[in-house]
Image (cartoon, grey):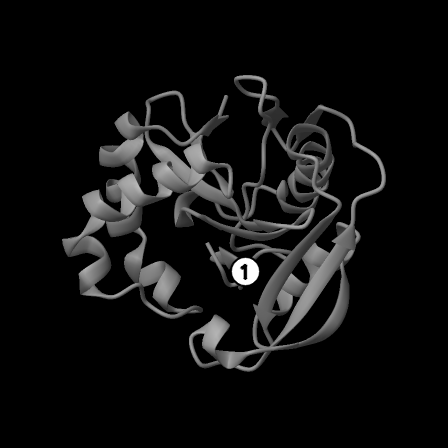
Amino acid sequence: MPELQRLRADHAPAVLAFELANRVYFAASISDRGDEFFDRFTERHSALLAEQEAGIGAFYVLVAEDGSVLGRFNLYRFEGGTAELGYRVAQHVAGRGVATATVRELCGLAAAQYGLRTLKAATSRENAASQKVLARAGFIPVGPADPADLGGKQGTWYQRDLVQPLSSSLLVRGYGVSRSCGLGLLIAMGRSAVGRACRDGADRG
């Protein structure tokens, strides 16, 4: 059963393999990370761990039983009880139907584990599937997103006010969604009726 784990230094090889294996898939709907991202991956991974240690972000990976990474799920830019949400999953786990359930779970964890009151997510106008997931998870559109935040694309900011935690364990279409290391879970999603365009959840991961 896939497990959501807080990002660690030893995740680096599996995360890099995930990014390389799905680069073309992700680029079909969002801006490509660029060669520099891969050339300086080790440095970037270390920077994320430093941000996490400083308490200004929380970064997770969805790990399969064989140790491979199925998805990346991030809470970042913590400020005044607010954070931004971003996520992306591997092509071969697309369509599992866990997107809405796990975003809802993340909302509960964001409040319970990190004391957050609001989550925001930006998605492009073309990413209809991500818009549906956010809406079903209780997010509402609050205004236009700067194209600079979406690889030059026009888009919308969505927001959810966090009121109460949701259940800590859900089972959706054969994928277990449960707390990991006392820190919780985020999302596994992809190509499906609610995930086809969500190669990078909310276009930012």
Q: Residue furthest right?
A: 163
x then y, percent, for residue 189: 55, 47
Instruction: Say whether residue 42 is left or right of residue 114.
Output: left
Give the residue at x 60% y 27%: 184
- The number of callouts visible is 1
Amino acid tagged 1: Arg
Q: Is residue 38 above or below residue 75?
A: below
Q: Is residue 85 above or below residue 101?
A: below
Instruction: Say whether residue 14 is left or right of residue 73.
Output: left
x then y, percent, for residue 34: 24, 66
Q: Residues within 10 Å of mark 1 (few under 14, many from 20)?
A: some
Q: Residue furthest left?
A: 39
Give the residue at x 57% y 41%: 187
Instruction: Say whether residue 194 is left or right of residue 38.
Output: right
x then y, percent, for residue 148: 46, 77
Residue that numbered label 1 is attached to: 196
Give the residue at x 44% y 41%: 71
> Where is residue 125, by image quadrant?
bottom right
Instruction: Say whether residue 34 is left or right of residue 157.
Output: left
Tell me the SS state at disc 1.
loop
Query: Residue 171 versus residue 43: which sits nearer the camera?
Result: 43
Query: Residue 18 versus residue 144: which sits nearer the camera?
Result: 144
Give the residue at x 66% y 69%: 157
Query: Residue 67 versus residue 46: which sits nearer the camera?
Result: 46
> Where is residue 61, by image quadrant?
top left
x then y, percent, for residue 3: 49, 24
